[in-house]
Amino acid sequence: MTSGDSRSLVVLRHAKSAWPEVPDSERPLAPRGRRDAPEAGRWLREADCVPDLVVCSSARRTRQTWDLVAAELGAITRVIHDARIYRATAWELLGVVREIPARVRTLMLIGHNPGVQELVVLLAGEADGYALEQTRTKFPTSAIAVLRVPGPWSSLEPGAARLTDTVVPRGTKP
């Protein structure tokens, strides 16, 4: 998916979660989330957005989302479960992204709103038009944003990326 010195950042909001009587970080996926997450994985595979590295929140719903996405990718991808992603702001997420080694060409970040939505808006250039406006308005569960990033992760700055794709994959009821 990448060429030259550019990289791709794939931002995925976790799939729909349930609301049982457990701490927020332990909430599992809801039935809809268990249907949507594999569809997100299929979309990523078909769009040639298979990541080299995944940085995933340590929350249960994000880990479950990744497991279902990964099963559809047709590749083995290294994953780091990072507690900093849970409840992170856009600026904190940008700090995590800037730590990624330059050899990683396609990075996936799996996290939570509002942080992931705000990260996409922070990074996307204003010229990205309709997709950026849609992302500003809503970034629902299972939403995926793909940004083209010029240069190494360590030098990523607000407004420097190009939002190339946004999609909200949805599975169908059996």
Image (cartoon, rainbow, N blue to C red):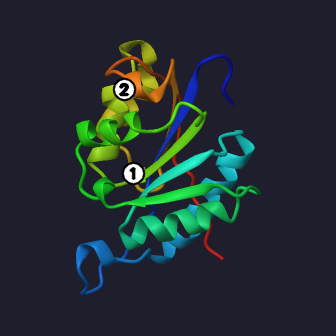
The residues bearing labels 1 and 2 have C-alpha atoms spaced at a distance of 18 Å
- Please tell me whether residue 146 is drawn above or below residue 18 in the rendered image: above
Quarter of the image where the N terminus is located: top right
9 or 155, nearer to the observer: 155
Residue at 32% from the left image edge and 61% from the top image edge: 83
23 or 128, nearer to the observer: 23
Q: Which residue is mark 1?
A: 140
- Please tell me whether residue 40 is drawn above or below residue 124 in the rendered image: below
Q: Amino acid at mark 1?
A: Pro
Residue at 29% from the left image edge and 59% from the top image edge: 86
Residue at 61% from the left image edge and 61% from the top image edge: 69
Q: Amino acid at mark 2?
A: Leu
Q: Position of residue 141 (x, y in %)?
A: 41, 56
SS category of the residue bearing label 2: helix
- Please tell me whether residue 112 is drawn above or below residue 125 in the rendered image: below
Q: Is residue 156 left or right of residue 50?
A: left
Q: Is residue 168 left or right of residue 121?
A: right
Mark nearest the camera among 1 and 2 is 2
